[in-house]
Every structure is written in C-alpha cells, then in structure tokens.
C-alpha cells in the first residue's frame, strides 16, 4: 500500500471524509485522531495496514485514557476539544522524577547525535523545579537548540513516501508539539537511539504538565 492508497483508506474510516489528491495529504489529516475521542474506539483500524501497527497503536491509546474524562466534560459543556489535554496531576514528586529522567534521556540522545554542544548544555542542568503555573524563562537558549536538534532528527526519519508519513500532521495536532509527535512515531523510525528518549517527556505531558529549560534548571509546570 502506497501513501495515496493509505490516505484513501484513512478517509474511508470517517463518514463524509473526502481526500483531495491535489493537496498535501498529511495536511488533510490534521486533528484526525480527535475523530476517535473520547475513548479511542476503532482507532486501531488506523494502523492495520502499517508495518508497525501494534507498536504504533500501543503508543497512541494512552492519550485517550489520559484525556477521556476531561473530553466528556467538554462535550457536556457543548465544546469540541481541538487538542488532547490531560488533567493536571497533584503528584509533584512523580513529575519531578519524570523531569530528571527527561534530562538523562536527552543526554543519551545528544550522545547518539554526537552533538557535543548539546551534551555540554544539558550537563549544566542540575535541578528540576515544579510550578503550579507557567514560570518565566530567563534563558531560552537550550530550548531553542534542543527543539532544532529534535526537529531535524525527526524530519530526517519521516520518510515522505512511507504510508505512515500521511499521519505526520495528525500526530503533530495531538498537542501541537513535535516532541509528542515524534514519540508516537518512534516505532516507525529507523535512525534512533536504543533508549526511548522521548518517553519521560510523554509522561510529563500525560501528567497534564509541560516543561522548559532555563539555564541550569528544568522547570516543570501544570498547564
């Protein structure tokens, strides 16, 4: 199955969904996974034609488990959520631990890339702090550098002719977050570290939190 055939297959899963062959295929599937809210019913059909179907499905299902209760509340209020938004956790200690793992795993990623500059910057991060709301960031350099490094790596792995490439925008639109998008696509990537280096980041997100680096700290905060 090529990507055009796969796009038609995906369109057949949603009533009234039409594919325009003259437009970018991936863009037409922005917010596609939201069609299976709140519980992810039948979302397994999305992956049936793909080589890594079981692994890709296993990665995705937790987003429905983490957001179902909030999504149902929004439905009751007459709101259709545009993104997946987990309820913020009350467990600070566990999220701080995820933050520490995030730093350690990113160092493995930097070593995999042989990016000495990124590794040097990460080695200076010695603390994880938790905030109830988004804090100010005084030094954004590490965030910019890291975003570029991860984005470049992810784009190199997103084979344009592979069927799974049709889902690139669908993955991104889960939270408008490249780190999350690449975590979900990880089983289909060939050039990757042996360690699942974005998993701690996903755990932070699933806890209803975000994180940003600020000089020598990782600041984790509730959405």
Image: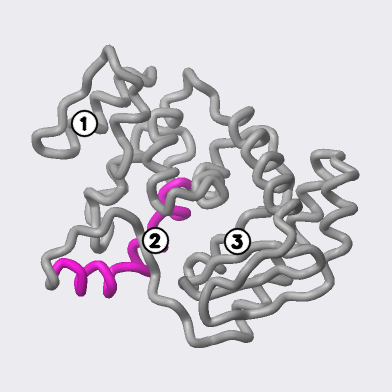
Left or right for 43, reference 160:
left
Q: Main secondary structure of the magenta part?
A: helix
Dots 2, 3 in contact, CB < 8 A:
no
Task: Say which residue label 3 marks.
Answer: 201
Q: Secondary structure at mark 2?
A: helix
Q: Which residues are magenta?
A: 56-75
Q: Residue, x 64% and y 63% (percent of image)? A: 212
Q: Which residue is mark 1?
A: 11
- The answer to which quarter of the image holds residue 166 is top left
* Near-viewer residue (199 or 188): 199
Residue 20 in the image: above or below residue 129? above
Say which of 115 and 112 sits in front: 115
Residue 220 point in image, percent of width and height: 61, 72
| Circle 1 Cα neighbour tier, 10 Å, few/some/many (<14 / 14–19 / ≥20) | some
Residue ID at (34%, 30%): 27
Q: Point out residue 39 in the picture as x, y percentages from the top left corner.
A: 26, 63
């Amino acid at each position: 199955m090529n990507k055009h055939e796969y796009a038609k297959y995906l369109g057949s899963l949603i009533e009234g969904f039409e594919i325009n062959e003259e437009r970018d295929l991936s863009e037409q599937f922005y917010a596609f996974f939201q069609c299976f809210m709140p519980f992810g019913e039948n979302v397994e059909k999305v992956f049936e034609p793909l080589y890594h179907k079981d692994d890709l499905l296993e990665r995705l299902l937790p987003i429905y488990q983490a957001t179902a209760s909030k999504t149902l509340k929004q439905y009751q209020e007459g709101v259709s959520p545009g993104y997946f938004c987990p309820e913020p956790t009350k467990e600070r200690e566990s999220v701080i631990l995820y933050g520490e793992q995030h730093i350690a795993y990113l160092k493995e990623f930097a070593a995999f890339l042989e990016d000495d500059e990124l590794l040097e910057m990460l080695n200076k991060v010695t603390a994880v702090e938790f905030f109830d709301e988004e804090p100010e960031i005084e030094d954004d350099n590490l965030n910019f550098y890291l975003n570029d490094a991860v984005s470049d790596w992810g784009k190199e792995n997103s084979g344009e002719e592979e069927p799974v490439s049709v889902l690139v925008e669908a993955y991104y639109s889960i939270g408008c977050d490249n780190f999350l998008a690449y975590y979900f696509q990880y089983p289909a990537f060939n050039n990757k570290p042996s360690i699942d280096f974005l998993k701690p980041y996903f755990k932070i997100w699933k806890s209803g939190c975000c994180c940003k680096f600020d000089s020598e700290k990782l600041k984790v905060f509730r959405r």
